[in-house]
Image (tube, helix red, strand yellow):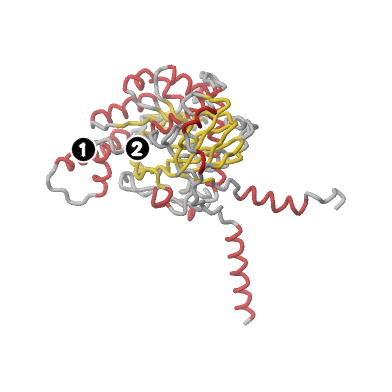
């Protein structure tokens, strides 16, 4: 009997701990608001000061100066005086494992990759965990939309674009299966040289074999598309969306020559939309990428140069130099634990060749254009989703990024997460105690 009682008490305590760790419940109510007396950062380079933003039924109805309200029926709107605070479009995080990887050291909380090399039919969306404790942490700095992306193999699978306040993955979806992600076989691989006790680049003898595997998949998909006899084939069915432009091909490539080879591969197979995920190596082929109109999502801004003869600040200058070469550029923060720092790497880019609004564009409208969602998100414009946030200061600076409001589709979301709850909990207990206590 005592054993049963102990088990029951233990179960209740475990349940209580789980309840206390729940993420904030999603908000369902859309509001009709006029945010005024604000500095409005449109996301396309414009700044309106003083400015107003109005929203109703989940969409933006007015963006402009105070005179923009003249043609609006204001009887159903509530006015919010922001006192000179800044309004920004919600930041967009591409290529993220958010909701797929909770604790890196616990395999049971990781669902970001599938076994095998060719998995174009794998869908990240159905594995997306809307209750991840990392989601409130990420959106606390203004990241309100993310592209949930699988990893591993040659063809990792299909990503989807989600909004970060939802009950389940169905509610979260903004664009379902927006693209397929490929890891281009590198021509070089890192090997440890025991003679010099250092790491060196050596030829990847398996590259040709791996490229042949990928070539065969895409050739089979093209043949299957033209065939009258279409037996159900999940892998080929997933690939054919690349040929009609309904999906994008996102290619990760490590070396400059690999980037050229990967783009040539995509052109040869008549893939409509190609996006490159790359770091400073892309600068070596910037003219080629501009000519081919291939956008680049820069992945390694906060890193060190690859070789000793490169400038120490080269990674920081990548967005500016690619833009100057005529390449469309977006920006992401790899991994999940620090994805909340997305606005601050944009801030770094603004210190190395870009002005503030150009840097903001990298994580708002440019990312939206690259992902194909700029008709819905990425800037503050009439008719777009009311997904935006209010910051007391400059959102690209850690000192100014202090959110007071955030809206996803016109719903004001709960900003506080686990860290804020813990702060309030212990602040109440210890704030009034003297040091002697």
State the image quarter where residue 328 is shown.
Answer: top left
Q: Is residue 88 above or below residue 105?
A: above
Front in this rendered view, residue 229 or 47: 47
Front in this rendered view, residue 8 or 330: 330
State the image quarter where residue 15 is shown.
Answer: bottom right
**Residue count near mark 1 (Cα–Cα under 10 Å), binned few <14, some 14–19, many ≥20:** few
- In the picture provided, is 317 more to the left or to the right than 374? right
Image coordinates of residue 87 in percent, x first then y, are: 55, 33
Q: Which mark is residue 251?
A: none
Image coordinates of residue 262 in percent, x first then y, are: 32, 29
- In the picture provided, is 428 more to the left or to the right than 305? right
Q: Which mark is residue 182?
A: 2
Q: Which residue is mark 1?
A: 219
Q: Earlier in the sequence, mark 2 or mark 1?
A: 2
From this viewpoint, is residue 193 visible?
Answer: no
Image coordinates of residue 151 in percent, x first then y, are: 41, 43
Q: Residue at x 64, y 48 (%)?
A: 420
Front in this rendered view, residue 136 or 10: 136
Q: Quadrant of the N terminus?
A: bottom right
Q: Residue at x 35, y 48 (%)?
A: 123
Front in this rendered view, residue 374 or 264: 374
3D distance between C-alphas at marks 2 and 1: 15 Å
């Amino acid at each position: 009997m005592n054993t049963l009682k102990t088990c029951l008490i233990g179960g209740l305590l475990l349940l209580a701990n789980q309840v206390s760790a729940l993420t904030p419940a999603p908000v369902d109510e859309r509001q009709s608001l006029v945010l005024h007396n604000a500095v409005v950062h449109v996301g396309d380079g414009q700044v309106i000061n003083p400015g107003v933003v109005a929203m109703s039924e989940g969409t933006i109805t007015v963006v402009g100066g105070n005179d923009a309200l003249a043609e609006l029926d204001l009887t159903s709107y509530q006015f919010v005086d922001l006192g000179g605070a800044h309004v920004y479009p919600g930041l967009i995080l591409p290529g993220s494992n958010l909701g797929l990887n909770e604790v890196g050291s616990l395999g049971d909380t990781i669902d970001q990759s599938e076994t095998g090399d060719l998995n174009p039919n794998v869908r990240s969306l159905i594995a997306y965990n809307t209750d991840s404790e990392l989601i409130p942490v990420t959106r606390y700095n203004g990241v309100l939309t993310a592209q949930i992306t699988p990893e591993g193999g040659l063809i990792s699978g299909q990503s989807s674009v989600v909004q970060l306040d939802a009950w389940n993955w169905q509610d979260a979806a903004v664009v379902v299966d927006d693209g397929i992600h490929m890891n281009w076989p590198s021509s070089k691989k890192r090997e440890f040289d025991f003679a010099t006790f250092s790491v060196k680049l050596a030829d990847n003898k398996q590259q040709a074999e791996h490229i042949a595997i990928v070539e065969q998949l895409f050739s089979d998909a093209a043949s299957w598309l033209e065939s009258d006899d279409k037996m159900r084939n999940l892998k080929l069915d997933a690939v054919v969306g690349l040929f009609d432009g309904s999906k994008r091909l996102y290619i990760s490539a490590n070396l400059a020559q690999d980037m050229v080879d990967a783009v040539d591969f995509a052109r040869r197979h008549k893939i409509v939309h190609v996006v490159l995920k790359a770091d400073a190596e892309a600068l070596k082929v910037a003219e080629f990428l501009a000519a081919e109109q291939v956008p680049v999502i820069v992945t390694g801004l906060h890193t060190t140069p690859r070789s000793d003869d490169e400038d120490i600040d080269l990674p920081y200058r990548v967005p500016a130099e690619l833009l100057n070469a005529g390449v469309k550029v977006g920006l992401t923060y790899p991994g999940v634990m620090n994805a909340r720092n997305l606005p601050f790497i944009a801030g770094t880019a603004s210190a190395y060749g870009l002005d503030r609004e150009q840097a903001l564009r990298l994580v708002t409208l440019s990312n939206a254009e690259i992902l194909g969602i700029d008709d819905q998100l990425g800037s503050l414009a009439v008719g777009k989703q009311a997904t935006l946030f209010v910051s007391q200061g400059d959102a690209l600076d850690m000192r100014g990024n202090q959110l007071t409001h955030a809206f996803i589709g016109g719903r004001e979301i709960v900003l506080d997460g686990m860290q804020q709850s813990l702060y309030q909990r212990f602040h109440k207990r210890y704030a009034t105690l003297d040091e002697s206590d």
